[in-house]
Amino acid sequence: MAAPPMTRPDLQRDAQGRLKHFLTIDGLGGEILTEILDRAEGFAGVARQAVKKVPLCRGKIIANLFFENSTRTRTTFELAAKRLSADVLNLNISTSSTAKGETLLDTLRNLEAMHVDMFVVRHGDSGAAHFFAEHAAPHVSVVNAGDGRHSHPTQGMLDMFTIRRHKGDFGALTVAIVGDILHSRVARSQILALTALGAGEVRVIGPRTLIPTRVEELGVRVFHSLREGVRDADVVIMLRLQRERMDGALLPSEREYFQLYGLTERLLETAKPDAIVLHPGPINRGVEMDSQVADGPRSVILEQVSNGIAVRMAVMSLCLGTQSQRAQGDEDG
């Protein structure tokens, strides 16, 4: 879990306080997050319509810039944009000019010349989406689809949406986040969102080598025992073990990790009887949880995937709606 990149405090909002870019949950506050969740609720039924589209972003161009592979995230962003009736441009980074040495700023300027309205950016370096937002033209919005170890705000929000649909008010909830907290941009976004939405108690659980120092400053309780950490929890969020981001031998073996921190049906019995289980995916079965839990009645993992489309529709329509209002305001002026 990385520290947030330095950026202007007002970068995500316009002068009227409306959402312009969605880069991090940090600093947005519960009001905007609730607005995203409420709007996503309105979009959740679009998938059941005969025509799975709404015309809110017709005529807009959204460019997906994925400098890191992520089939699930890219696909849900693409589906969300198409359901909003936007035109979608998927940039194949591996064969683009960036592979030949083109800088991020060059990429931005070239795509702006194509009259792109929004960039959805996923990058291995923390702060890449902030960089795009700071240098983008005034009419362009930027959405962070995951940057380094810093932030993955739409994943955090789709998790909040899934929790709210099952549990309602956040204030009464005890939420346990389990696993590789240190390397997880998802965990940071989840913690910030839960805190902003007023969750009763947020716990982080994992081995000492995978818990960030001073993480308590984010308002969480730290546990090193999975059994104690999930006891009486309403929500259990399992995280992917991110071997690719680890430097050195932080874990002895995946088998030992599962023995200590893998979620089983027996361990889940210590949580509330109606507790739900989430995972941002992809799951390492037999490492983070066993298949009985992943496919069991308390798992809402597949719902998270479906909910991701509605939440990303909400975020994009809010940013592009703000953009249209700004443009109209400039014309009126």
Image: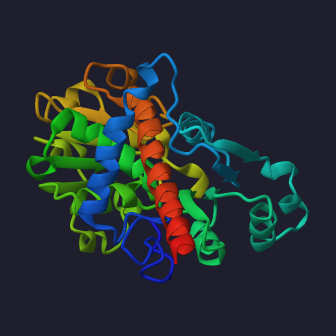
Residue 130 in sight: yes
Question: How many circles with numbers are drawn on the protein?
Answer: 0
- Quadrant in the rendering for residue 169: top left
Q: Residue at x 36, y 69 (%)?
A: 26
Q: Nearer the viewer, residue 172 or 115?
A: 115
* Residue 15: percent from left, percent from top: 42, 78
The answer to whether 194 is drawn above or below residue 178 in the figure is below
* Residue 61: percent from left, percent from top: 67, 50
Apparent side of residue 115 relative to residue 175 in the rendered image (left or right):
right
The answer to whether 16 is drawn above or below residue 35 in the figure is below
Q: Residue at x 16, y 55 (%)?
A: 199
The answer to whether 168 is drawn above or below residue 298 in the figure is below
Q: Nearer the viewer, residue 203 or 280?
A: 280
Looking at the rendered image, the quarter that the N terminus falls into is bottom left
* Residue 186: percent from left, percent from top: 43, 53
Residue 261 in sight: no
- Quadrant in the rendering for residue 287: top left
Q: Nearer the viewer, residue 164 or 241?
A: 164
Q: Residue at x 46, y 62 (%)?
A: 322
Apparent side of residue 237 relative to residue 129 in the rendered image (left or right):
left
Q: Residue at x 26, y 19 (%)?
A: 297
- Quadrant in the rendering for residue 269: top left
* Residue 148: percent from left, percent from top: 57, 62
